[in-house]
């Protein structure tokens, strides 16, 4: 169930990032969000891009201890197993996995199937695709 973003409708309000960080980190801090909305100012105007998990499973393949898995709908990190090596961070083509202060991998888990970024988006820019293959 990866995210689908229709960036042409995005206003850049970053409510999705605020929702994500609030749910997962207990603070409204876009830097700690598991998806990123990027504003690029060009001569043509503002260009909005995104970085979000595409559920390519490269992190799962890169994890040497099997701490990352896929339940068919989203990615899961078992923090009991994660050794904080950062292999998943380096393997992520979208650069959206990071290690938290405890050196545990942080990855989008779609808020357990009810993603707050989707719920909070006032323009319905973010929706869910069907299923991770």
Image (cartoon, rainbow, N blue to C red):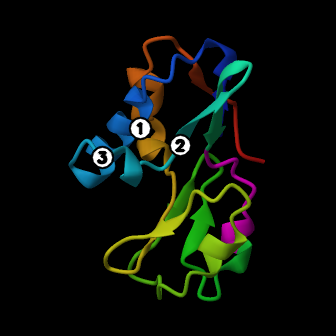
Task: Name above or below for residue 67 compared with residue 75.
Answer: below
Give me the disc on residue 36: 2
Q: Which residue is mark 1?
A: 17
Task: Name above or below for residue 9 compared with residue 61.
Answer: above
Q: Position of residue 36 (x, y in %)?
A: 53, 43
Q: Of label 3 and label 1, which has the lower sequence position?
A: 1
Q: Quadrant of residue 49?
A: top right
Label 3 residue SS: loop
Dot 2, how many residues are within 10 Å of its Cα: few (below 14), some (14-19), or many (20+)?
Answer: many
Q: Of label 2 and label 1, which has the lower sequence position?
A: 1
Q: Quadrant of residue 16?
A: top left
CA separation, marks 3 and 1?
8 Å
Give me the disc on residue 29: 3
Dot 3, how many residues are within 10 Å of its Cα: few (below 14), some (14-19), or many (20+)?
Answer: some
Is-magenta flag for residue 56? yes
Split into 4 quadrants, where in the image is the N terminus?
top right
Which residue does the image show at 60% across and 67% down from the upper left? 69
Which residue does the image show at 39% across and 32% down from the upper left? 116
Give me the disc on residue 122: none
Q: Position of residue 126 (x, y in %)?
A: 57, 24
**Extent of the magenta region:** 52-60
Label 2 residue SS: strand
Front one among 39 and 97: 39
Front one among 74 and 50: 50
Q: Is residue 75 visible?
A: yes
**Do labels 2 and 1 touch, CB within 8 Å?**
yes
Q: Spot the residue most to the front.
A: 43
Q: Is residue 1 visible?
A: no
Front one among 93 and 46: 46
Is-magenta flag for residue 74? no
Which residue does the image show at 42% across and 43% down from the upper left? 111
Q: Main secondary structure of the magenta part?
A: loop
């Amino acid at each position: 169930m990866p995210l689908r973003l229709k960036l042409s409708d995005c206003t850049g309000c970053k409510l999705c990032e605020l929702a994500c960080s609030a749910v997962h980190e207990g603070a409204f801090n876009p830097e700690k969000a598991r998806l990123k909305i990027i504003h690029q100012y060009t001569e043509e105007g503002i260009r909005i891009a995104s970085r979000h998990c595409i559920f390519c499973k490269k992190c799962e393949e890169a994890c040497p201890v099997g701490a990352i898995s896929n339940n068919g709908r989203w990615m899961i990190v078992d923090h009991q197993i994660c050794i904080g090596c950062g292999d998943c961070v380096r393997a992520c083509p979208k650069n959206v996995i990071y290690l938290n202060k405890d050196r545990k991998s942080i990855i989008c888990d779609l808020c357990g199937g009810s993603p707050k970024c989707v719920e909070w988006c006032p323009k319905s820019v973010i929706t869910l695709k069907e299923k991770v293959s």
